[in-house]
Amino acid sequence: MTSEEVRRIAINTGGGDAPGLNAVIRAAVLSADRRGWEVLGIHHGYAGLLDTSKIETLDLKSVRGITHLGGTILGTANKGNPFEMPMKLPEGSMTEMDRSDEVVENFKRLGLDALIAIGGDGSMRIAQKFQDKGIPIVGVPKTIDNDLAGTVATFGFDTATSVATDAVGRLHSTAEAHERVFTVEVMGRYAGWIALSCAIAGGADVALIPEIPFDIDIVCRKIMSREARGRRFSIVVVAEGARPAGGDMVTQGPKELGREVLLGGIGVQVARQIEEGTGKETRNLVLGHLQRGGTPTARDRVLALGFGAAAVRVIAAGESGVMVALDPPDVKTVPLSVATSRLKTVPLESDIVCTARDIGLCLGDE
Ligand code: F6P
């Protein structure tokens, strides 16, 4: 399909929100408008193509003044994969149902030429399946976790890292005043990008990440060696996916049907073990969704606006089945299959890990 043949496109935001979603929407709508295309906003991820009652036309007025706003004007959901929709059976038990054909029918009925799907790895996997069913899709990589393959960065990560860095920085004074240890549990799911980055930038003493299983004795030794040098406080950043060598990740309960298992709880466990191992008073702080809230950083805004505009250029060029991706200094495309082929975790030999070790940040393994 050429640029002249495109009449109407749609856009949705799926998975956990990330600062910058509204900037992508604004750039996509402005770029589409310049080409004379109509844009429909689909609410609450792919679920909005099942119940189409809330679909709205996005015009220049709808996206005025939203670049700096967190959240998403379209709402989002991290339940609601149309290929595995949770459904209650008459006897009360839950099952999953494939309703993807209804989405395809509605897409055609609405006269749509392409869909811009903004999301993380889960949304890109769904995008790939709909592309295979005939819906032309261009993905936009969003997640604070920065774990999508094929792109150097996802938008949202810089903001989350800045919030976490600020928190680690602020903890220094109270930790020092009380001669305490603080554990700070940060998000990131199975990747340690946020934890490692905020620990380095915020001057923490220990960073525990999923990629490097930790030994609590090594962590305690690091704290006591600081103590011996008169540094009677320590800050330990703990990724929510961190786990002890030979142990498991801590979850907030069993996996619910239709959504990923929720990680969380390792921070307080590490705090208790540090208290036992060092005798030092230890407090735990869980940063949680603060990392996703509020205004995106300038870097995330520029990245998100770039992704939104690029997605429209990709559609205009007749391409689909791809995700826009940062390949500095440009935004390029990668096949959706590349984006979903693996999770981009922190490579053990990478520069960021070497930097951490060189500046004396303990990673719990040596
Ligand atoms: O993927 C983004 C993320 O914030 C993860 O870092 C975290 O594990 C998860 O989402 C939390 O999900 P929810 O918003 O459902 O609590």
Image (cartoon, helix red, strand yellow):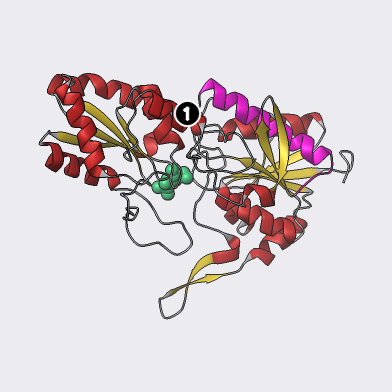
For label 1, the residue is 159
Residue 52 visible here: no
Query: Which residue is outermost to the left?
Result: 279
Asked if the magenta segment contains residue 311, the reply would be yes
- Specify start and end residues of the magenta stretch as a single range: 296-320
Q: Say how many tags the image has.
A: 1
Is residue 12 found left or right of 276 in the rendered image?
Answer: right
Residue 338 visible here: yes
Instruction: Judge the density around disc 1: few (<14), some (14-19), many (≥20) Cα neighbours within 10 Å.
Output: many
The residue depicted at 34 percent of the width and 25 percent of the height is 360
Asked if the magenta segment contains residue 52, the reply would be no
Which image quadrant is residue 344 in?
top right
Q: Of helix, strand and loop, which mostly describes the magenta segment?
A: helix
Establish if 297 lies above or below 261: above
Is residue 360 found left or right of 40 in the rendered image?
Answer: left
Is residue 37 found left or right of 334 in the rendered image?
Answer: right
The residue depicted at 62 percent of the width and 56 percent of the height is 126
Residue 192 image offset from top left, x and y in percent:
43, 39
Residue 30 image offset from top left, x and y in percent:
72, 29
Is residue 347 found left or right of 3 in the rendered image?
Answer: left
Residue 91 image offset from top left, x and y in percent:
42, 81
- Look at the image and tell me in which quarter the C terminus lies: top left
Relative to the observer, which residue lies in front, 236 or 3? 236
Which image quadrant is residue 202 in?
top left
Establish if 273 lies above or below 96: above
Residue 265 image offset from top left, x and y in percent:
28, 48
SS assignment at label 1: helix
